[in-house]
């Protein structure tokens, strides 16, 4: 019985051994088909001061799933070209036991981001991939990180005032590292007793601006400076490597003292006057500017009559004084106020005209323009100077047949006379009984030309003489500033056939000068231009008078 049991055990043992040998052989055959991966290292790109990108191309996974892949690197000295007889130093061979990235698993190509690098350093890198057979590397390649040094130019100092200026920087290169702060820094000469004066090289430890981060060039506003002081300035930019500076420039702030350069009379009316004033602000912020005046104080100040309501044109402004008394001598000075004090211009004298009254009792404002004194309103009288009535002809047929003096109201509407005055044919202008007040006359064509020439010619004088705005002008009236105070209004005209035309569009004014037997000269205001035209004597036009 024992012999049978022993024999059975022997058979079982042999079977187990045979099975084990077969399994081992199968496993051995399977392992013999798995190989290491095959891969290539990509070219290194986006090399900055502290980072770069690289990656790998998986050519084959070796027959086994790739469980890890990435790049590994090591730093080393940059290899130089050796003479053929010299032995070249070995190329460092990075492995996964050192610096590496892990970019997942699987057989797809990959890109890796290498960070934490040092500026201006040579690195050796290669791709790797790991499967069940082990780890395989691609070819080793090298790169050198950027030095991290920012290169920046200081831009021209501009807009230099008494207490401020502007400057900036042009960033040529960020050195491969992100700029975290940029601006300009400045300093003045600080001379100490016993020490030699030297030109300062300002740093961010002095005064500075902060214009944010990023690679873009920038402009800085420099404030809280001292007036009449020389400063030294340069642009700066900071990254993780350090702070770099541009070239040093110098500038001197203005003294802050304003100066009234010139004051001109533009318009002198019976109850108002306008002036054109040019000045320099000395680089200071002007808090108020205007004109002060008095009829008794020969050196008026801001304690006298003052107006600062002006039209500002930079270094020139136009200002108007209201509430004056006709026929009065006044003293006036321009002024400007800043944080540095109040400055005055020279005192000027002007006399307001007393105005003029016609035989009907109508009072007209007058203006002095150059050497001439003009009415500032259109004539609206209905009698000659001797008291004879000027016929008011309303019928169109009757008007067209006239050869003697007459007037009319536009569209026979008396309500518009106060604004536009009346329209007269030329025969009323030429009548020996005189249509204008004593001491005045209808201007000749030559006197019109004197006015036009004084206001710089036909192409621009219209804008200087037309009432501004569109309250009475139908067009946009662009360019009409009325800086002469003439206040030309678009009263239109009455044609020789009796028809009324162009109110709101044209101001048309008679001269006393004939152009042959049937025509006389006139002036037309349209746009910014004054045209000299010949007109039939039967036409009804507006009249302005000039003082004898």
Image (cartoon, helix red, strand yellow):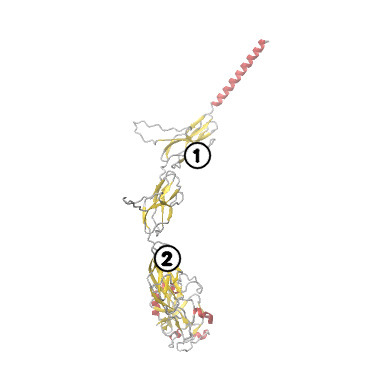
**What mark, if any, has residue 172 been given in the picture?**
none
Q: Which of pointers 2 and 1 lies earlier in the amino acid sequence?
A: 1
Q: Is residue 478 visible?
A: yes
Decide which of 529, 120 is in the foreground and name it. 120
Q: Is residue 354 above or below residue 68?
A: below
Q: Which residue is mark 1?
A: 111
Q: Is residue 351 above or below residue 197?
A: below
How many labels sit on residues?
2
Q: Is residue 230 above or below residue 265?
A: above
Graded by Cα atoms within 10 Å as few (under 14), some (14 to 19) or many (20 or more), the crowding at tag 2 reads some
Q: Nearer the viewer, mark 2 or mark 1?
A: 2
Decide which of 187, 10 is in the foreground and name it. 187
Q: Residue 385, image x and y in percent?
A: 45, 87
Where on the picture, by quarter, is residue 338? bottom left
Name the residue rendered at 57%, 22% in the picture. Answer: 24
Mark 2 touches mark 1? (CB < 8 Å): no
Quarter of the N terminus within the rendering: top right
What secondary structure is found at the residue carrying circle 2?
A: strand
Q: Residue 476, image x and y in percent?
A: 49, 70
Q: Residue 121, image x and y in percent?
A: 41, 39
Q: Is residue 149 above or below residue 375?
A: above
Where on the picture, by quarter, is residue 336? bottom left
**What mark, if any, has residue 337 been given in the picture?**
2
Q: CA distance from mark 2 to mark 1?
A: 67 Å
Decide which of 533, 266 is in the foreground and name it. 266
Q: Is residue 102 left or right of residue 242?
A: right
Quarter of the C terminus within the rendering: bottom left
Q: Residue furthest right?
A: 1
């Amino acid at each position: 019985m024992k012999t049978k049991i022993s024999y059975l055990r022997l058979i079982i043992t042999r079977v187990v051994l045979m099975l084990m040998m077969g399994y081992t052989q199968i496993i051995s055959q399977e392992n013999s088909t798995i190989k290491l991966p095959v891969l290539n290292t990509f070219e290194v790109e986006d090399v900055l001061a502290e980072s770069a990108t690289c990656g790998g191309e998986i050519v084959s996974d070796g027959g086994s799933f790739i469980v890890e892949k990435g790049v590994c690197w090591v730093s080393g000295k940059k290899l130089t070209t050796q003479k053929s007889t010299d032995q070249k130093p070995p190329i460092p061979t990075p492995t996964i036991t050192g610096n590496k990235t892990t970019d997942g698993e699987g057989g797809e190509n990959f890109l890796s981001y290498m960070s934490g690098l040092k500026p201006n350093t040579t690195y050796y890198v290669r791709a790797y991939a790991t499967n069940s057979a082990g780890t395989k590397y691609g070819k080793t390649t090298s790169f050198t990180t950027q030095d991290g040094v920012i290169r920046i130019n200081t831009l021209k100092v501009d807009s230099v005032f008494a207490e401020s200026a502007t400057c900036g920087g042009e960033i040529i290169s960020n050195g491969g590292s992100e700029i975290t702060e940029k601006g300009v820094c400045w300093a003045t000469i600080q001379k100490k007793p016993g020490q030699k004066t030297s030109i300062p090289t300002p740093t961010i430890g002095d005064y500075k601006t902060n214009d944010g981060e990023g690679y873009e060039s920038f402009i800085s506003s420099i404030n809280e400076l001292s007036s009449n002081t020389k400063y030294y300035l340069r642009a700066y930019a900071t990254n993780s490597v350090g702070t770099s500076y541009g070239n040093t420039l110098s500038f001197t702030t203005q003294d802050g003292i304003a100066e009234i350069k010139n004051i001109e009379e533009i318009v002198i009316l019976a109850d108002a006057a306008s002036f054109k004033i040019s000045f320099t602000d000395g680089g200071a912020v002007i808090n108020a500017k205007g004109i002060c005046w008095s009829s008794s104080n020969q050196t008026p100040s801001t304690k006298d009559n003052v107006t600062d309501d002006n039209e500002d044109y930079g270094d020139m402004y136009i200002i108007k004084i209201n509430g004056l008394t006709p026929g009065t001598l006044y003293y006036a000075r321009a002024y400007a106020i800043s944080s540095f004090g109040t400055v005055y211009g020279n005192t000027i004298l002007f006399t307001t005209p007393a105005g003029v009254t016609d035989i009907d009792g109508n009072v007209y404002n007058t203006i002095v323009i150059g050497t001439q004194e003009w009415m500032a309103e259109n004539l609206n009288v209905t009698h000659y100077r001797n008291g004879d009535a000027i016929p008011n002809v309303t019928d169109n047929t009757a008007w067209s047949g006239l050869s003697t003096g007459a007037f009319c109201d536009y569209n026979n509407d008396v309500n518009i006379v106060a604004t536009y005055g009346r329209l007269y044919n030329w025969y009323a202008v030429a009548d020996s009984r005189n249509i204008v007040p004593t001491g005045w006359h209808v201007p000749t064509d030559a006197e019109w030309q004197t006015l036009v020439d004084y206001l710089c010619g036909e192409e621009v004088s219209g804008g200087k003489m037309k009432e501004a705005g569109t309250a009475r002008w139908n067009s946009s009236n662009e360019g009409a500033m009325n800086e002469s105070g003439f206040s030309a209004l678009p009263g239109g005209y009455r044609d020789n056939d009796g028809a009324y035309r162009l109110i709101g569009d044209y101001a048309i004014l008679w001269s006393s000068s004939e152009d042959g037997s049937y025509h006389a000269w006139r002036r037309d205001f349209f746009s910014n231009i004054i045209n000299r035209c010949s007109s039939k004597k039967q036409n009804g036009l507006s009249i302005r008078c000039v003082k004898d």
